[in-house]
Image: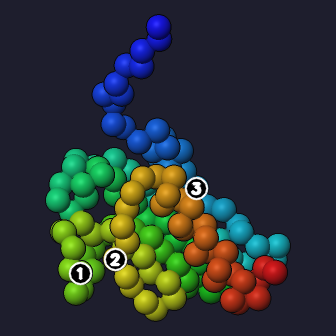
């Protein structure tokens, strides 16, 4: 009989992928005018950063303007949940973001990037 051992390591297995992106800048359109930047570092766990990360994932337009951003650099006004600072910027709107894990953060970021690039007619 094979028995499964309980998993005692609650570490996010996708965290290394996110951390490996730190410092990367990628061009994301055929014309080379839109780009994304990743800044991701470990920090001590705190009420503001309960996942132990300081991160900024951003999409920039041709003039360098930030079009999309997922980060936890500051609190969000009118935030009704805990003290976590996770939030997203989409054009000029800022909304709280519910951080789940690194894989979900990356998927949500790329989904928003694709939506904005489609809206701007940059990609089909």
Q: Residue at x 37, y 71 (%)?
A: 97
The image quadrant that residue 81 belongs to is: bottom left
Q: State the CA–CA distance, disc 1 to disc 3.
A: 30 Å
Q: Earlier in the sequence, mark 2 or mark 1?
A: 1
Residue 8 versus residue 109: which sits nearer the camera? 8
Reading the image, the residue beneath label 3 is 24
Q: Nearer the viewer, mark 1 or mark 3?
A: 1
- Residue found at the very far top of the displayed protein: 1
Task: Determine which residue is flagged by label 1.
Answer: 79
Q: Position of residue 83 (x, y in %)?
A: 18, 68
For the residue pair 26 and 63, the one nearer the viewer reads as 26
Q: Are marks 2 and 1 in contact (CB under 8 Å)?
A: yes
- Secondary structure, mark 1, is loop
Give the quarter of the image for residue 112: bottom right
Camera-near label (2 vs 3) is 2
Q: Earlier in the sequence, mark 1 or mark 3?
A: 3
């Amino acid at each position: 009989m094979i028995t499964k051992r309980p998993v005692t390591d609650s570490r996010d297995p996708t965290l290394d992928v996110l951390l490996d992106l730190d410092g990367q800048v990628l061009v994301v359109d055929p014309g080379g005018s839109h780009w994304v930047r990743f800044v991701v570092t470990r920090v001590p766990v705190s009420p503001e950063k309960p996942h132990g990360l300081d991160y900024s994932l951003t999409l920039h337009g041709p003039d360098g303007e930030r079009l999309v951003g997922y980060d936890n650099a500051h609190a969000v006004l009118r935030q009704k949940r805990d003290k976590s600072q996770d939030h997203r910027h989409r054009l000029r709107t800022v909304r709280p973001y519910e951080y789940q894990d690194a894989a979900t953060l990356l998927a949500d970021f790329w989904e928003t990037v694709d939506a904005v690039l489609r809206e701007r007619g940059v990609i089909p």
